[in-house]
Image (cartoon, grey):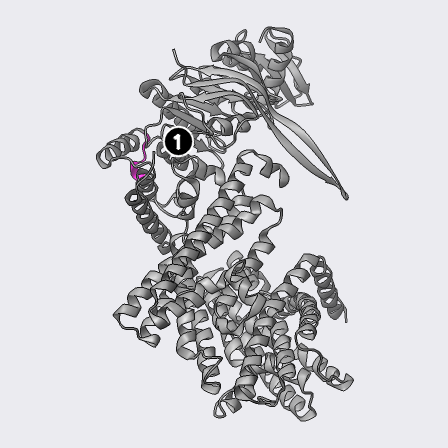
Amino acid sequence: MPESLKNYLGLMAAYVRINLNAQLEYRGAFISEAVAMFVNDGSWVLFWVMFFHRFPALKGWNLQDVMTIWAVAAGSFGIAHALMGNGWHLPTIIVNGQLDLWMLYPRAVLPHLLLGRTMSTAWGDAAFGYAVYIALVRPDLAHFLMFVFLTVSVAALYVGFSVASASLGFFVGNAAALCEQWRFAVITFATYPQSLFSGLAKLALFTIVPAAFVSYIPVEALRMLSIRHVLASVFGAVVMLGIGSAMFYAGLRRYESGNLLSMHG
Amino acid sequence: MKAIGKYTWIAYTSVRSSLAYWGEIAARTIFMAMILYIFMRLWTAVYEGAGAERLGGLSLKQMLWYLMITEAIVLSSPRVSVEVDEDVRTGRLAVQLLRPLSYALFLMAKTFGERAVRFTMNILSGSIVTLVLVGPIPMSLSGLAMFALIVPAAFALDFLAYLFIGLFAFWLESTAGLWILYSRLTMLLGGMLMPIEIFPDRLQPILRNLPFAMMVYGPARIFVAPNARTLLSIAVSQMWGLAAFSIAVYVIQNIALRRIQSNGG
Amino acid sequence: MRHEVEIENLKKNFVLKRWHGLRRSVSEVAAVDGVTLTVPAGEPVALIGPNGAGKSTTIKMLTGILHPTSGHLRVLGLTPWRERRKLAYRIGAVFGQRSQLWYHLPPRDTFELLSRIYSIRRDEFIRTRDVLVERFGLGPFMDVPVRKLSLGERMRAEVAASLLHRPQVLFLDEPTIGLDVVARQELRDLIREWNRKDGVTVFLTSHDAGDIEYVAERVVVINHGRVVVDDRVTNVRRQYLSSKILRIQFQRAAPPVDLPGVTTLARSEYELKLAVDSAVAPIPEVIGQLLQLAPAADVSVEDPPLEEVIARIYQTAKGGPV
């Protein structure tokens, strides 16, 4: 029974509602965690403010560029994991055999299970990304609309990447450390101006550690209001979602054979 | 005498169990390599852009070694707050608060053991990475001795701050927010990302007297540019800091104790 | 006539990789080794067997979570692992250890979510929900967070949730585990009622003999991945479950006991452990007779452990027809 997009969006809305309700049962913790992440992101931007106060230009990048990097990176990460928090927690779900429950529902496993949880800190990231862009970069309407589109596109890329990194757990025992490092690499490299890197490193940032798609391409898109860069961003997101899905479903076939379980004892 | 022996044994056991995780060493090396590589690219660009041999009194090589030490310090801090937080919630702390000094000492011995191991691992892996990236800096035995002298007090200060934060679990639903705030303040004001000398002139005297600088900037600066006068001023600040924090912890513990006694736990 | 569940010579092998120091050994373990079973619509079946017998593996294959190594398997005319989503609309499942109710929210919220997951039409959903709330007695706590409910209340809500989309087959894995006597019986009654009145085929796995007696009409015993017994509950009860274990603690030294249908299993100075065949000697009579022998301080009656029953079944089955 193929679901229409409308049906899926309705399901997503239902999950957002129930996830928020669950979080608000412990609103103190939810709010403090979101605020903590907001503060965390803010302190990095503060660092850059102090940095650029002392060193006005860095290989052609200025404070506004770096703030845009942070706005896109944090905003997208926030959207991705506020809506699809289980993307982040997928490694645990796989290891604990919780996939079974998701397989009992009349839904494609991946798009459904991703909705099952929200990450409270991601809300802080999303709020921060948008706050920084609106208040500190102060865009006009055209830039803002492009920004919104880009955060959704990069959020899709983040979801694909979270799933891909988590799916390592289907194939490699004790993949948790590898997954963590890979995720850390993308998030960290994404928050620095790409002009710092060249050669092999730059190549890596467009491929195995797709940080360039998180910040460099969107920032260039916004700098020049370039549709071409926007398309490149969408392309990256589609590819990453494809890779993530492929890895997940290949892993799921292994799971269904039951041989995953014997690997973990 | 017996009491000291007990705490030493606790620290020793803690050291032994931390050493068991060789995989963690590998993970840390990759971690440090990523961060230091980014810093190297960043500061090379800065030095080139400013056309300077020295910034804040440090050469590029010294700058990178400085950053390696600050990272090694910050990354070695165990999650004491989380433990104290848990102890409060499970009620264990209420019992232990009846003998507050021994609780604090017990926790300190335990965390020092963990921290000493983590710190050593970080220094080792960080040194290898930094040697590969920029090469060595001149080092002397007396310089290293000064460094060794100043590190324990830095750790003790950090520990007291975490204990202080953890005790707030008596009043707050979650201390995670306070912990994040503290760690970000350390990052921004403690000189983790750039030495105090780079900050605006007006801020420098204030920052030098804050506890954050005594924990992070102080030891790192002594390592790359050992200087008896700097050592003395840092050591004196550390003593003041230890006194102030001990009083603060003592006060909070008493308030907490009174709260338990009036609420019956 | 098509059966709801058709299983023929079902097999499932797991590959086991073990490390012995640096060397690795690979072996195949047959968790399910040729199970054949057909279940007509509306029949309540109990699937029992010791741990590791292949019960959960079979259930996982029936629900489409695992795919078999070989054999024929159809549920409601569909191949579970190939048509998982289509099948999921028509089956329900309650796994005792894993809850689908959101822990910090009231059952009402989970029910709403389920109506979205199963794309149930609004008016239909409201009707079914209200019927379930009434018959399962959920009214008082529909708006109470699940974490505040007793285990009995939670399981009732859990089973009701699994019926919201009106499935034709309901899989229950250890649904009464951890429940007190009253809650257990309540749940059994509800499940049985739903089976008898609404025609839902029930597939129940359990370690509890009482679950079998009250809910199922048919018992399938699985051991070592094979069906060992497949019979009507009434037959199995007569043969194996009529025996109860009676413990009695006397105030004085325990007297010798020689009553028909009563076997002494164990004896200590004041206590006796007896096996009573209730078909021959009803329990109340036996207790009365024992009390006449000597005054007692404590008496308890329990079912023999299922493992014992199964062992006995297996022993008999070895010799007899299967």
**Left or right, A105 with reference to B43:** left
Q: Main secondary structure of the magenta part?
A: loop
Q: Is residue C28 left or right of residue C48?
A: right
Q: Is residue A211 left or right of residue B71?
A: left
Judging from the image, mark 1 belongs to the subunit labelled C
- Which quarter of the rendering shows the N terminus of chain A? top left
**Residue A44 visible in image:** yes
Among the 4 quarters of the image, the one containing residue A113:
top left
Q: Secondary structure at mark 1?
A: helix
Can you give x and y, in whole percent of width and height, for residue B4 in the image?
74, 70
Residue A223 lies, in percent from the top left, at 36, 72
State the extent of the magenta-drawn residues as a range: C136-140
Residue positioned 40% across, 60% down in the render: A233
Q: Is residue B257 visible?
A: no
Q: Is residue A36 above or below residue A250?
A: below
Identify which residue is drawn at 48% across, 49% down. A244
Residue B14, quarter of the rendered image: bottom right
State whether residue A255 is above or below residue A131.
above
A251 and C33: which is toward the camera: A251
The percent position of residue B215, horizontal first and vertical second, equals 60, 79
**Residue placed under numbered mark 1 in the picture:** C88
Judge by depth and name the residue closer to the eye, A58 or A228.
A228
Q: Quadrant of the C terminus of chain A?
A: top right
Is B94 situated left or right of B17 in this image? left
Q: Nearer the viewer, residue B51 or C292?
A: B51
- Specify few, some or many for label 1: CA neighbours under 10 Å numbering under 14, 14-19, or 20 or more: many
Residue at (46, 78) in percent of width and height: A48
Q: Nearer the viewer, residue A188 or B20?
A: A188
Q: Amino acid at mark 1?
A: Ala
